[in-house]
Amino acid sequence: MTPKEKAEQLVHTYRMLFMDVGGDYGEEILVSVLSKQCALIAVKEIRYTHYDAITTMWWNDVEQEINKL
């Protein structure tokens, strides 16, 4: 899986969670912003628990891709 694909997967997972809990299409912007922020928090937590350089670089790339979404 590429960093971009992982970024999209994480944001999509959080978006679906928010939509299931009560988001509607009128709140899509808020849901998108919250989804990205949650995905960024998850990436930061994962990155800080992996200390090898290759894994850290990959998660850094995922974070950059989330910011592009």
Image: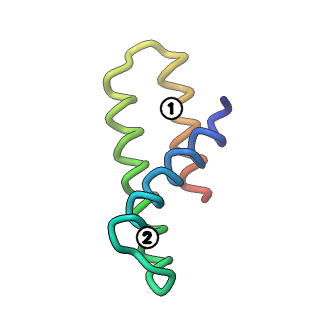
Residue furthest top in the image? 52
Say what amino acid the circle numbered 1 marks: Trp
- The residue at 54%/55% (across/down) is 67
Q: Position of residue 37 (x, y in %)?
A: 39, 57
Q: Residues within 10 Å of mark 2 (few under 14, many from 20)?
A: many
- The residue at 50%/20% (across/down) is 55
What element does badge 1 sit on?
helix
- The residue at 44%/81% (across/down) is 27
What element does badge 2 sit on?
helix
Say what amino acid the circle numbered 2 marks: Val
- The residue at 49%/77% (across/down) is 29
Whole-number angstrom distance, CA of label 2 to CA of label 1: 23 Å
Q: Position of residue 9 (x, y in %)?
A: 56, 45
Which residue position holds label 2?
A: 31
Which residue position holds label 1?
A: 59
Residue furthest bottom in the image? 26
Image position of 59 with respect to 64: above or below: above
If the image is split into quadrants, where does the C terminus sit? bottom right
